[in-house]
Amino acid sequence: MKRLIVPAVLGWSLMVLMSFSVVAQADSLPDFTELVEDTSPGVVNISTTRTLPSRSSSSFQGFDNEDIPEIFRHFFGDRLPMPPGNDAPGQRQERQSLGSGFVISEEGYVLTNAHVVEEADEILVRLNDRRELPAELVGSDPQTDVALLKVDADDLPTLELGDSEELKVGEWVAAIGSPFGFDYSVTAGIVSAINRTLPRDVYVPFIQTDVAINPGNSGGPLFNLEGEVVGINSQIFTRSGGFMGVSFAIPINVAMDVADQLRDDGRVSRGWLGVMIQPVSRDLAESFGMDDATGALVADLDPEGPAADGGVRAGDVILEVNGEEVERSSVLPRLIGRVSPGDDVTLLLLRDGREITQEVALGSWPNSENESGLADRDNQVRLGVSVNEVDAETRERLNISGGVEVTAVEPQSIAAQSGIRAGDILVSIDHREVTSASELSEIVAALPDDRAIPLRLFRDGRSLFVALRMD
């Protein structure tokens, strides 16, 4: 009888211990109910409308009548039929998009992503209490993907802002937004990594999370467990178009610095060093006598840029900026970009095996008012180059009638990834001749996305083509 009692007691004890374990585990998981109740009123839905040019009855699929290929004329004559599902000729077309945002002040300022409101003709902000308010775009910064809106309302519910510098990998975070148009959806997860650098987003040290983010979440807030906003949900990594466990948020400290400049000045000013950099590989590190492959190698300089004026040379390795280590070359633009133009920075350089310190007064990059001559700042940012007019002597020597000279190439930009260098002379893009900086802006603005575009340039007196792929 005793032999039967002992296993029964052991089994009962094991069940009790397992029950306590489950209860303890449940108690250790975060409860987001209070956070959601407190913060939801400050989260908004953002819808935009963009009016597209009306379709002319004399064109089809991008062809004017005189450009219709002969094979099409053989079957359809000079007027091609409208493809099924397209709008009738002359009818106004509208494109709508949805996103998220959040209120940062009682005066009606709303923060969201720049791509949510890009090229929008109308912006509508819908609050938690179902009020719908037209919004004015105060300003946007494509470089950080931050936009500031203003609605005409008082005493709006606002969200408390946290300090993204205090975030740690592994801590719990939550997001509220409108994925696929479903308002005020809540998802949660942990911080997977911090200070992530993404291609073409060199000014943002992204927060990586595994919080479920989908189309429509963009611009919405990322919260810590105290209910403070620590980031703006901005991007996802996906192969299918849906969530795959890798999401990226803009740190709120970065976003608020941009928002303050947009509110005060209508634009964002960043420091510019005027260098073209490349990573330091292990082989390069060994050749320079370095123990670790860190820093940013100066491959080229704008001869009239701040770095050249400050004594920086090609072949220098930038190890620190104002005492902050440059762990990778991709970190340098971020460190320089957050310093105001005109301010001095202290660079720790490795030159000829010795560490030296150099003081450099930064210029402004990019800026529609600088010496580059580009008329349209957004288009300059899109391509990532600074240019000057080509002098008459150079045009005569190369036997060209126009062209612009590249004075600087932004690291990680489309131009840099396409192989364009400082000193190149751009002659044509997509078979359109470039004769001035303003014309370059117009051509870049009209380039299609996600298609390779031929660009002709002169380098060292020789003509060559490179392929651009716009985003």
Image (spheres, grey):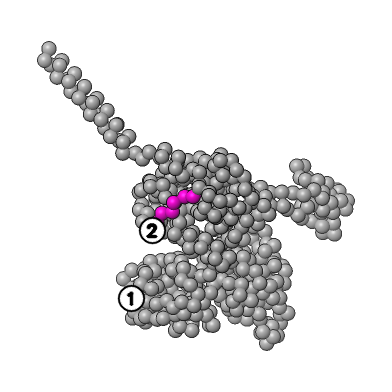
**Amino acid identity at mark 1:** Gly
Residue drawn at (41%, 39%) of the image:
34
Stretch of the chain drawn in magenta: 158-163
In the image, residue 203 lies at what x, y percent?
48, 64
Q: Quadrant of residue 64?
A: bottom right
Q: Nearer the viewer, mark 1 or mark 2?
A: 2
In the image, residue 435 lies at what x, y percent?
71, 76
In the image, residue 417 lies at what x, y percent?
55, 65
Quadrant, the C terminus: bottom right
Quadrant, the N terminus: top left
Query: Which residue sits furthest left?
Result: 2
Towards the viewer: 139 or 75: 139
In the image, residue 440 lies at what x, y percent?
67, 71
- The residue beneath circle 2 is 165
In the rendered structure, the answer to whether residue 311 lies left or right of residue 131 reads left
Q: Mainly helix, strand or loop, the magenta region?
A: loop
Residue 140 visible within the image: yes
- The residue beneath circle 1 is 289
Check residue 159 for magenta coloring.
yes
Query: Which residue sits furthest top?
Result: 1
Residue 466 visible within the image: no
Question: What label sits on residue 436 in the rendered view?
Answer: none
Query: Which residue sits furthest front?
Result: 155
Instruction: Check disc 2 and report its element: helix, strand or loop.
Output: helix
Residue drawn at (50%, 53%) of the image:
104
In the rendered structure, the answer to whether residue 197 lies left or right of residue 145 reads left
Instruction: Assess disc 2: are there few (<14), some (14-19) or many (≥20) residues with their C-alpha within 10 Å of its C-alpha.
Output: few
**Amino acid identity at mark 2:** Glu
